[in-house]
Image (cartoon, grey):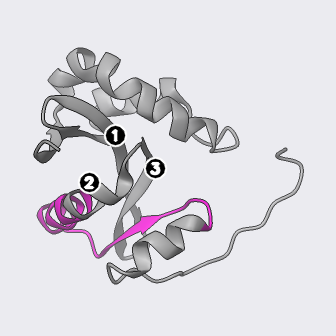
Amino acid sequence: MGQIRVVPLNTKEIEFWWPIVEPHIARAAAESYGFTTVEEVKQAAGAADMQCFAILEGLKSVAACVTEIKIKHDVKSLHVVCLGGHGIDEWLPALLETLEAFKEVAGCDGIMCVGRAGWVRKLQKFGWKQMFTTVGKGYE
């Protein structure tokens, strides 16, 4: 196994990295019931409205994470918009460490991830807690 690195991509690097991260983002967006699209992520990351992180094992791309900073009332939050890849147990600790550091630099109060129920189990061992439950109808 190679070294795990989480690479924050600046807006000038999105075009170069897009063919590498897009397959991971596409898989995550496919599970979003249309709330997140690949095109939206590319445009927003290129405009610095979202942040994109490439996750590498050695020189191999294994995952990608996209975040967005949201401010509501007096709470500034780092939201994980989409996260896709494989071998999550290998790279999740490094990603969470990177997101924690980015949260601090960005002056955010916390980090939030909206996703499928399995994320609760994965993230609880890192000190995350379930905050909400979302239910829906008609999104099949």
Q: Residue 84 appears at what percent x and percent y?
A: 44, 43
Residue at the image position 63 percent from the left and 45 percent from the top: 32
Q: Residue 35 appears at what percent x and percent y?
A: 63, 43
| Residue 49 showing in the rendered view | no
**Which three-letter amino acid code belongs to the residue tagged 2?**
Trp
Q: Which residues are magenta?
A: 95-117
User: What kind of element bears circle 1?
Assistant: strand
Which one is in front, 25 or 137?
A: 25
Residue at the image position 17 percent from the left and 58 percent from the top: 98
Quarter-of-image position of residue 137: bottom right
Label 2, residues with CA under 10 Å away: few <14, some 14-19, many ≥20: many
Q: Is residue 126 magenta?
A: no
Quarter-of-image position of residue 94: bottom left
User: What kind of element bears circle 3?
Assistant: strand
The residue labelled by disc 3 is 81
Distance of mark 3 from mark 2, alpha carbons? Answer: 18 Å
Q: Are marks 1 and 2 in contact (CB under 8 Å)?
A: yes
Q: Nearer the viewer, mark 3 or mark 1?
A: 1
Total marks in image? 3
Sooner in the amino-acid sequence: mark 3 or mark 1:
1
The residue labelled by disc 1 is 63
